[in-house]
Amino acid sequence: MPRYACTLGAGAVAGLAVVTVEGLGTPEAPHPLQAAFLAEQAGQCGYCLSGILVSAAALLERDRSPDEDAIRAALEPHLCRCGSHNRIIRAIQGATT
């Protein structure tokens, strides 16, 4: 379940597994989302990217083939300032195939 690090105290996750964007993959073996974001050139300024990747990974764990409405709903809380929304949606859809 994605949570915002800026509003969640460390004590609230004591004893729980925490995965950050750095834990999704490695340069040698990127997470399918990371590979899809690179292929789609979905990352622009980076302001929202970490949160979007983590939220998208959580979505894909719950629903392996989400439709566009489900993807948009999962990403709705994230503030993207550069306007790369369409590429982000395509990247997430690409990571599901």
Image (cartoon, rainbow, N blue to C red):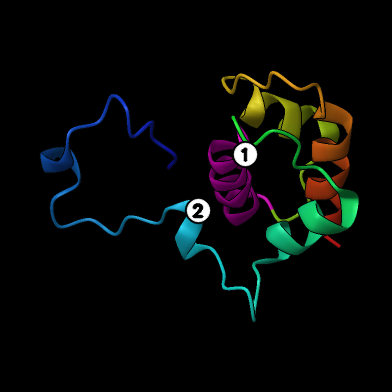
Q: Is residue 25 above or below residue 7?
A: below
Task: Name the spot of residue 72 as percent of width and height, x first.
Answer: 74, 27
Which of the numbered marks, if any, corresponds to residue 21?
A: 2
Task: Name the spot of residue 47 as percent of width and height, x first.
Answer: 59, 30
Which quadrant of the structure image shows residue 64? Answer: bottom right
- Viewer-nearest residue: 32 or 69: 32
Which of the numbered marks, if any, corresponds to residue 13?
A: none
Give the residue at the far front of this rendering.
45
Whether label 1 touches label 2, CB < 8 Å: yes
- Viewer-nearest residue: 48 or 73: 48
Which quadrant of the structure image shows residue 85? Answer: top right
Identity of the residue drawn at 38% across and 35% down: 3
> Quick one: quadrant of the N terminus?
top left
> Quick one: quadrant of the C terminus?
bottom right
| Dominant secondary structure, magenta | helix
Identity of the residue drawn at 29% across and 59% down: 17
Q: Is residue 29 above or below residue 58?
A: below
In this picture, residue 67 sits left or right of residue 78: right
Task: Name the spot of residue 11 as percent of width and height, x first.
Answer: 10, 41
Identity of the residue drawn at 59% across and 52% down: 57
Residue type (three-letter) at the residue carrying disc 1? Leu
Element at badge 2? helix
Q: Is residue 34 above or below residue 56?
A: below
Which of the numbered marks, if any, corresponds to residue 49?
A: 1
Q: Which residues are magenta?
A: 48-63
Mark 2, residues whose alpha carbon is within 10 Å: few (<14), some, or many (≥20)?
A: some
Identity of the residue drawn at 55% across and 42% down: 50
Give the residue at the far bottom of this rendering.
28
